[in-house]
Amino acid sequence: MAKVLGIKQQRVQFFYDTLFKSRGDATVANITATELAAAERKLFVTSRGSFDLSNMATGGQLVSDQTFLCYAVRHEVQFWGGASDVAPFQNTPGVFVLFLNSTTFQFMCSEKIELEGPIAMTPAGGGPWGYVSDSVQPVLTNGEPQSRALYVLPIPVAVTKRQGISVTMRIFELLGTANNATVNVVNATNHYSGLRLCRTYLDGYHTRDVL
């Protein structure tokens, strides 16, 4: 169907890609590398072919003459129902805090860095949420699911037609002292026996042709 010339549709819509979504210790479970944490990985650069992982129709840029005003970069992080064998962060809260405080991002348009920092500063503002004082397995997520949990950019990042976009995720080691060894955060994450998930969202106003 031909597009309607001179008319554009604007909608509020986020784009997302997944750093990892899997369950089970990587040393014993049958998990592919793309479903596990890595020291560095770029998101939004390839078409994942699965709506479960990403809603980007094409890798690296928006389709056709679409444009996007990004008002928020968000990160959803979850660990639930398992443990890790990397001391002293074996339990769920330990792995969660370790990962959250060791992971950074760089949001890039073309070759320019538009926003960067630790993912703890860009909470998802959504996702599962719940805690009971005597709960053995509390649900943890990066940011209380309310709008006040979002870090909204006062000036949006404009993504123009066919402009390349990507988000580089980096996970750093937790450096130790003479008496405490350095912790490999990637290994601690991948050795977690429960559910682990990390998604990145680019949230804002999406403009596209009317067909």
Image: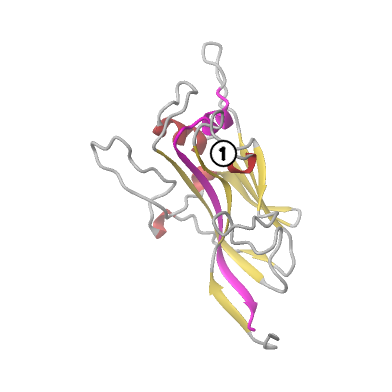
Q: Residue 111 placed where, x, y %?
A: 76, 53
In this view, 176 is above or below 147: above
Q: Residue 163 placed where, x, y %?
A: 74, 63
Q: Badge 1: few (under 14), some or many (20 or more) residues near its Cα, within 10 Å? A: many
Which residue is disc 1 drawn over?
103
Report the side of 151 relative to 165 (left or right).
Answer: left
Residue at the spot 66% in from the left edge and 55% down from the top edge: 44
Residue lying furthest bottom in this view?
A: 5
In this view, 8 is above or below 85: below
Foreground residue among 142 and 49: 49
Residue at the spot 70% in from the left edge and 58% down from the top edge: 59
Q: Residue 101 placed where, x, y %?
A: 51, 36
Residue lying furthest top in this view?
A: 179
- The quadrant of the rendering that contains the N terminus is bottom right
Foreground residue among 19 and 182: 19
Asked if residue 173 is among those painted magenta in the image, a careful observer would answer: no
Q: As shown in the figure, which amino acid type bears the numbered disc 1?
A: Thr
Residue at the spot 40% in from the left edge and 29% down from the top edge: 91
Q: Residue 179 placed where, x, y %?
A: 52, 11
In the figure, residue 202 lies in which quadrant?
Answer: bottom right
Asked if residue 199 is among those painted magenta in the image, a careful observer would answer: yes
Region of the chain picked out in magenta, as a range: 183-211
Q: Secondary structure at mark 1?
A: strand
In this view, 177 is above or below 16: above
In the figure, residue 205 lies in which quadrant?
Answer: bottom right
